[in-house]
Amino acid sequence: MSGVLALVGGGEWTEGCSFDAGLLETAGTDEVVVLPTGSAYEGPAALVDQARTWFAELGAKVVEANVLTRPDALLAENAELVANAKLLYLAGASAMHLRSVLKETPVYDALVAAWRGGAVLAATNAGADVLCDPMVDSRGGAYTVGLGLVAGLAVIPRSDTWSRDKIHRTVQLAAAGVTLAEVPERTALIRGADGSWRAEGVGTVQIYIEGRPASLADLRA
């Protein structure tokens, strides 16, 4: 068993992200712990401020987990903050940086434990990418190793900003047994606590299995 998992395509905390209200309700909390790790060098403070403004409109407050570098991810106080959260949001633009910071650290272990213990885990943009294995390298659309919270599933976050040729290449490069999901901005691919998948938000999630178009109903728990 685990909590709800939301893989958000990007465009986070903007009009159209209707799923955030439901995530708060499911978590039963008015506090969101945000990790801006993936934007450590691209204005993490502005990203957290955006989250604060958005969630304030939903009646919730944001607490920043100041995890920007690998030493930050080794600190016990940061791991404790993450471990006690009921709703976590992993954000940022660089999946490679997220992986290098979080892999095999107390903060990542705490994140996984919190989710498996029933916390709601949302990950947007590069955060959604890195939690999967394999992970899509947005620079060229090929695959690399992710953190593996969700094995056998890869996502293309911000897929609405990709060319069809680039998406086609990524679809064709998928190894046997890998499911691929296009997740546009302001759209979430959500795994319920019962293992079922659904999509919410403004865009359409496209699934591919073995390189062929499929439906959300075909996703494994």
Image: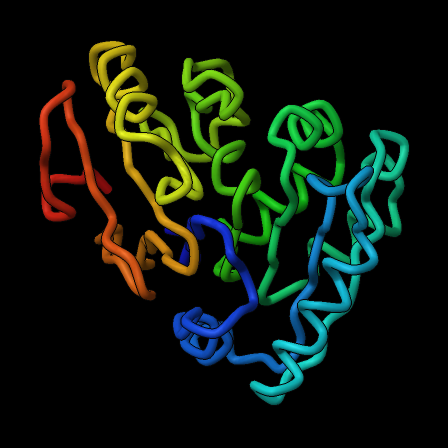
Side of 168 relative to 27 (left or right)? left
Q: Residue at x 48, y 34 (%)?
A: 129
Q: Residue at x 61, y 59 (%)?
A: 88
Q: How many marks?
A: 0
Above or below: residue 204 compared with residue 215: below
Q: Residue at x 82, y 38 (%)?
A: 41
The C terminus sits in image quarter: top left
Residue 136 % position (x, y): 44, 23
Residue 5 % position (x, y): 42, 53
Above or below: residue 23 compared with residue 117: below
Q: Residue at x 85, y 34 (%)?
A: 69
For the rendered model, the colour scheme is rainbow
Residue 34 % position (x, y): 69, 59
Tell me the quarter of the picture where residue 108 sits: top right
Tell me the quarter of the picture where residue 132 sits: top left
Front position in the image: 217 or 171: 171
Above or below: residue 218 compared with residue 44: above
Side of 194 relative to 211 (left or right)? right
Residue 78 % position (x, y): 83, 50
Front position in the image: 3 or 48: 48
Side of 71 relative to 57 (left or right)? right
